Each structure stands twice: as C-alpha cells, then as structure tokens.
C-alpha cells in the first residue's frame, strides 16, 4: 500500500519532499508547542487535513520523517482522524505511515543526492527516523 502511494505521489508532484507535496495538496502545516511529545499530529477541520508539527523539531532533520509520516496518514488514511507521531503511537495505521515515510525520505535522498544512501544511518542523519527523539 505504501509503495503504491509513494509512486503515485512522486509521479504526480515530481518531488519526494514532504513539505512541497503538502503544499501542492493544500495541506495546512502548523508548528505548535507540544512539549516533548507528540512530534506530529494530523487532524481534520471541515474535512481538510491539518498537520501539526512540534516546534521542538522545526530545525531538526526529524522534521522530514515526521512530516512524511503525517503525510502518509493524509494520503493513505483519508477520513480517519487524530493521528500522532510520538512514543505512544502504535497500530497498523502507524506502521503504514512509517512505511510511507521511510520510502518517501529514501526517495527524497535520491532526489537531492542523485544516489541511494550507503547506509540507513546516512538516511537517518539527513532526515530523521521513526525512533529518533521518541524516548
């Protein structure tokens, strides 16, 4: 499911940048003071998705993985409400959103560097991960 969604989104918008994709989808992004957790949350207002991102990660590479994760919810789980990215997140929908985010940031790396990362650590250093800053 995640692979198909990633292929469709990148094909349609010609980028793997989650912030540019969100802009093209007219997904509002608000930076809020959540404290330590959650890192991100997707909510809906009048059927329009709004992604809330923790100000704590505004200048951190983690913002890319977290935004990709929340975008995964917007794209793959349209109509469901109340997703959060953080240490208490769990379940099938969270796993699917993590798969989407991992694939999307992998493609973002290729887009920006012209090659695949040599290691998973290189990808995490550049864009964050599902486990960074969660404890």
Image (spheres, grey):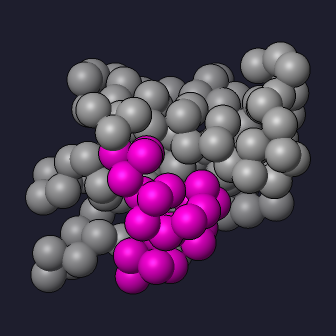
**Quarter of the N terminus within the rendering:** top left
Residue 112 lies, in percent from the top left, at 81, 53
64 vs 24: above or below: above
Q: Is residue 9 visible?
A: yes
| Quarter that holds the C terminus | top right
Question: Which quarter of the figure has residue 81?
Answer: bottom left
**Residue 62 seen anywhere in this rendered image of the structure:** no
Q: Position of residue 119 (x, y in %)?
A: 83, 17
- The question of residue 72 being in magenta is answered with no
The one of 9 and 84 positioned closer to us in this rendering: 9
Instruction: Please give the name of the residue rendered at 53% of the width and 49% of the height, measured from the top-left corner.
Output: 68
| Picture residue at 87% right of the left edge, 47% below the top | 113
Question: Is residue 20 in the magenta section?
Answer: yes
Q: Is residue 47 above or below residue 17?
A: below
Magenta span: helix, strand or loop, mainly? helix
In the foreground, 47 or 53: 47
| Range shown magenta | 5-26
Q: Image quadrant of residue 96?
A: top left
Q: Residue at x 39, y 76 (%)?
A: 25
Q: Please report the residue visible at 54 percent of the width from the left and 34 percent of the height from the top.
A: 103
Between 13 and 71, the residue placed more toward the observer is: 13
Side (left or right) of 90 relative to 63: left
The count of marks equals 0
Q: Position of residue 50 (x, y in %)?
A: 36, 71
Relative to 13, residue 66 above or below: above
Does 118 appear above or below 27?
above
Where does the image place residue 129, in percent across and percent down from the top left? 66, 31
Residue toward you, 74 or 46:
74
Q: Does 41 sit left or right of 83 as displayed?
A: right
């Amino acid at each position: 499911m995640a692979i198909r969604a990633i292929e469709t989104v990148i094909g349609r918008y010609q980028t793997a940048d989650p912030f540019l994709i969100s802009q093209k989808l007219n997904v509002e992004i608000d930076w809020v003071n959540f404290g330590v957790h959650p890192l991100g949350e997707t909510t809906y207002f009048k059927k329009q998705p709004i992604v809330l991102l923790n100000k704590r990660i505004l200048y951190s590479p983690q913002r890319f993985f977290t935004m990709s994760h929340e975008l995964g919810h917007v794209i793959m789980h349209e109509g469901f409400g109340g997703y959060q990215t953080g240490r208490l997140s769990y379940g099938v929908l969270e796993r699917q959103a993590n798969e989407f985010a991992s694939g999307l940031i992998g493609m973002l790396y290729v887009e920006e560097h012209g090659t695949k990362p040599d290691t998973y650590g290189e990808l995490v250093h550049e864009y964050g991960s599902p486990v960074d800053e969660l404890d």
